[in-house]
Amino acid sequence: MVGILYESEEWSSYKLLEEIQSFGIEACLISLEEDHAFELVNSCDLLVSRIFASAQFRAHHKSLERMPEVIKQAECKGIPILNPPRAHFYETSKALSTAILKQKGIAVPDVYGVFLPNEIDPGSLRYPCIIKPDCGGRTTCTVIISEAEALAGAVAEIPAVSMIAEEYIRPVYGYITRVEVIGGECRLILKRSVTADGLSAYHLGSAYTHYTDCPEKLRQTAVRAMELLNIEFGSLDIIETERDFYIIDVNAVSNASEDNTEMFGFDLMGETAAYIAERFREMEKRNDDDKRNI
Ligand SMILES: Nc1ncnc2c1ncn2[C@@H]1O[C@H](COP(=O)(O)OP(=O)(O)OP(=O)(O)O)[C@@H](O)[C@H]1O
Ligand SMILES: [Mg+2]
């Protein structure tokens, strides 16, 4: 049985479930908002995490709080998790994933610190900078701060969650590069336009185009970054400049909405399910081989 750990009632998790089942594999959804989640976990042979960092903005704190416990329990019982457990901690801390990438020599924005909104000292930042929730997604509470004087007004609107303040990388070419990596391969590379407020996101109305001539170095760096972070399937957001390209965000839980498949000409949930199914079959085979050898 494959158990999909989820917290958000959205199309993508149900689609992933159906696609895994379409390979003839038994699968179920396990909501980490529910108290009986821990029992259900025990009945699985493989877990798949769809616990988004953005859970904290859906009042799904329980799922985020329970995840480390679920990981421990799964490790105890020998139940593997995809993405591997470490990836969850990168999904839920931009500061952590950025620090690891920097340490490994991958270009990332300079990080000025992680603060509560009312504790950010305007003097500790360089401008323009960007502030965004350390554990967040979907551009919630993400603001570009052009100068020290603008900081107080911007943070007044933000709830008391941990914020990362970092260098603003100007997207001089007018797009952000979104790379979907599955099993160590760049499977989809898109240019996502930057909107009038300087941010880029599907829900803000960004337009997407296929990035057919994406530089090889960027592809290789995307794959390497995912390897370093133990993310077998997920996405990266990258800003290219004349000087270099910078990884500004890494997601260990990728998402798509129903209309994206046609729009991108790529079925992200279907392809992710195919990868999970392959990993599940390999696991079954290994277990069978082990039994035969006993
Ligand atoms: N350092 C940066 N420099 C310039 N723009 C940035 C930077 N960090 C974030 N942005 C802008 O803010 C948007 C959201 O930031 P980011 O991708 O880190 O957060 P997210 O909310 O996790 O997004 P997603 O849900 O797509 O993963 C980016 O698409 C980009 O437009
Ligand atoms: Mg993200």
Image (cartoon, grey):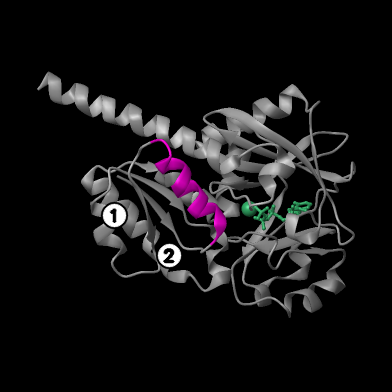
Picture quarter with ligand 1: bottom right
Q: Which residue is rendered at x = 66% and y = 43% of the image? A: 261
Please name the amino acid that badge 1 sits on: Val
Please name the amino acid that badge 2 sits on: Ser
Q: Is residue 216 toward the left or the right of residue 59 in the image? A: right
Residue 25 at x, y percent in the picture: 35, 39
Q: Is residue 20 magenta?
A: yes
Q: Is residue 236 visible in the rendered structure shown here?
A: yes
Q: Is residue 31 magenta?
A: no
Q: Nearer the viewer, mark 1 or mark 2?
A: 1
Residue 243 at x, y percent in the picture: 85, 34
Q: Nearer the viewer, residue 145 or 214?
A: 214
> From which residue to which does the magenta span run?
10-23
In terms of secondary structure, where does tag 2 sit?
helix
Residue that label 1 marks:
41
Label drawn at residue 63: 2
Q: Which residue is rendered at x = 56% and y = 35% of the image? A: 226
Q: Which residue is rendered at x = 45% and y = 63% of the image? A: 64
Circle nearer the N terminus (1, 2):
1
